[in-house]
């Protein structure tokens, strides 16, 4: 994901389609780390945006 961002791509992370062994780490990543490099959205938000 970081490589795509650095290459100029618009990156989207589908928040309800990823996981981590540590729930707290996943929550932290979704709230703090990932938004610096990608748009974070749910599956429903992505589908609605395509309509």
Image: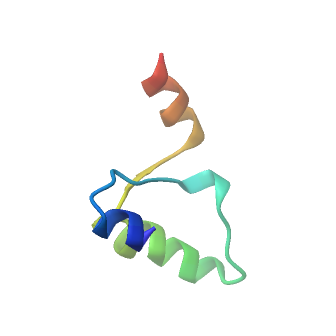
Q: Position of residue 2 (x, y in %)?
A: 39, 72
Q: Residue furthest right?
A: 21
Q: Nearer the viewer, residue 9 or 39?
A: 9
Please tell me which residue is depicted at 65% across the width and 62% down the height of the picture.
Answer: 18
Q: Is residue 36 above or below residue 49?
A: below
Tell me which colouring the rendered structure shows. Answer: rainbow
Please tell me which residue is depicted at 66% across the width and 54% down the height of the picture.
Answer: 17
Q: Position of residue 36 (x, y in %)?
A: 28, 68
Q: Quadrant of residue 7?
A: bottom left
Please tell me which residue is depicted at 40% across the width and 72% down the height of the picture.
Answer: 3
Q: Position of residue 38 (x, y in %)?
A: 36, 59
Q: Is residue 31 left or right of residue 47?
A: left
Q: How many marks?
A: 0
Q: Nearer the viewer, residue 30 or 8?
A: 8
Q: Quadrant of residue 34?
A: bottom left
Q: Residue furthest top?
A: 51
Q: Quadrant of residue 4?
A: bottom left
Q: Position of residue 40 (x, y in %)?
A: 42, 54
Q: Is residue 9 above or below residue 5?
A: above
Q: Is residue 51 above or below residue 28?
A: above
Q: Is residue 25 above or below residue 42?
A: below
């Amino acid at each position: 994901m970081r490589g795509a961002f650095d290459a100029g791509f618009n990156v989207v992370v589908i928040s309800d389609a990823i996981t981590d062994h540590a729930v707290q780490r996943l929550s932290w990543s979704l709230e703090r780390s990932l938004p610096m490099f990608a748009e974070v959205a749910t599956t429903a938000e992505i589908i609605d945006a395509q309509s």
